[in-house]
Amino acid sequence: MSKRPNYLAAARAVADAADIVLTTHINSDADGIGTSLALAIALERLGKRVRFACPSKPASIYAFLPRFGMAQTVDNDAAAAAMAPCDLLISSDCGDLKRLGACAAIRHGKLLNLDHHATNDRFGHLNLVDEQGTCSGMVAAKLLDKLDVAIDREIADNLYATLVFDTGRFMHSNTDAAAFRFAAKLADAGVDVSAINRALTYTKKPHDLAITRLGIERLTVDAQEPRLAGIAITRADIAAVGEPEDWGELVDVPRSLAGNQVAYLFREGKDGQTTRMSMRSNPPFQVSPVAQAFGGGGHLQAAGATFPGSLADCLREVIPRLRRQLQD
Ligand code: 5GP
Ligand code: MN
């Protein structure tokens, strides 16, 4: 069904633009930030005027990424309106316009939607959506190839972070030969792979570990379907421990149980009106249909959504759907 990604058309749009703003999804992660920074560095080399706007404050754990200082937080309409218009707005790693938050309002000539999510709704004027891409960083690398930009060390460090993050350190079902070929290419460009892994992994603060402890305390294996396990965190829990900058890989706690096939992390919003859902599965089981049922998206085996209700409502409605995903 999906159209083949048109790298040449995207490269032409980049070549035609003098002023480019990069952006990514809300609560940006290593793929969204790393892809945007890699593109920013490369496009500057091509003589473009480049800015990088994030719809929510990027977590400080990503500060080790080369040129992280370029990121500016644009999390409200006034900040977006205050930005000078650009010729081209490039959204990386984002499946729909809603997830761009205030950055969707940045004035632009054209919008290039660069992504690798199967559920991407093609919201750009140009849609470089490559579902074969292990990470958005890989899509960006192919685009840079078309633009004849060499991958130097700073670009490679950012791209390696996107790859390691989206494959879960080469563990998830998107890890394939192409992922390893990309890794080898980046290692050849000089990436210190171990240093990047450490920066993404061994940089927790005591508060992050308190969140992990809370997650373990709230871990539940489903009574009806033992292959389903997850963590449900109330707004009172979050108020007691303090909201972390980034929820990291807490959903990996239920996932790490022997026999687990579907894992979830549900966290209630401050006002009890919404609940963030983060879900994972092992093939052949899928979680993206459940995310899409609530207006979210992602990949077949890693997806998320914002549930319009309290944690209790979310559990009541979503747990039976997750059980059903295991029935086939
Ligand atoms: P996570 O559970 O780590 O937040 O997200 C898992 C995957 O689903 C990521 O690729 C992420 O971009 C995507 N995702 C998470 N939440 C949403 C959402 O609300 N909408 C869409 N379209 N994708 C989401
Ligand atoms: Mn991604």
Image: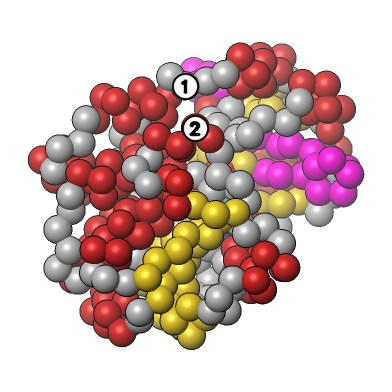
Relative to residue 170, is residue 86 depicted above or below?
A: below
Q: Nearer the viewer, residue 139 or 74?
A: 74
Q: Can you give x and y, in whole percent of width and height, for residue 133 in the image?
A: 31, 56
Q: Can you give x and y, in whole percent of width and height, for residue 192 in the image?
A: 22, 30
Which residue in the protein does label 1 denote? 203
Amino acid type shown at disc 2: Ile
Q: Can you give x and y, in whole percent of width and height, for residue 237 in the image?
A: 81, 24
Q: Is residue 195 left or right of residue 61?
A: left
**Magenta stretch encompasses residue 57:** no
Earlier in the chain: of badge 2 and badge 1, it is 2
- Label 2 to label 1, Cα distance in Å? 7 Å
Q: Which residues are magenta?
A: 253-277
In this rendering, the count of numbered labels is 2
Amino acid type shown at disc 1: Thr
Using the rendered view, name the quadrant where residue 314 is placed: top right
**Magenta stretch encompasses residue 275:** yes
Which residue in the protein does label 2 denote? 61
Q: Residues within 10 Å of mark 2 (few under 14, many from 20)?
A: some
SS category of the residue bearing label 1: loop
Q: Residue at x 31, y 84 (%)?
A: 16
Using the rendered view, name the quadrant where residue 278 is placed: top right
Q: Residue at x 20, y 44 (%)?
A: 153
Q: Residue at x 73, y 31 (%)?
A: 243
Q: Is residue 120 left or right of residue 305?
A: left
Relative to residue 91, is residue 286 depicted above or below?
A: above
Q: Nearer the viewer, residue 302 or 33?
A: 33
Q: Nearer the viewer, residue 41 or 117?
A: 41
Label 2 with label 1: CB-CB less than 8 Å: yes
SS category of the residue bearing label 2: helix
Q: Residues within 10 Å of mark 1 (few under 14, many from 20)?
A: few
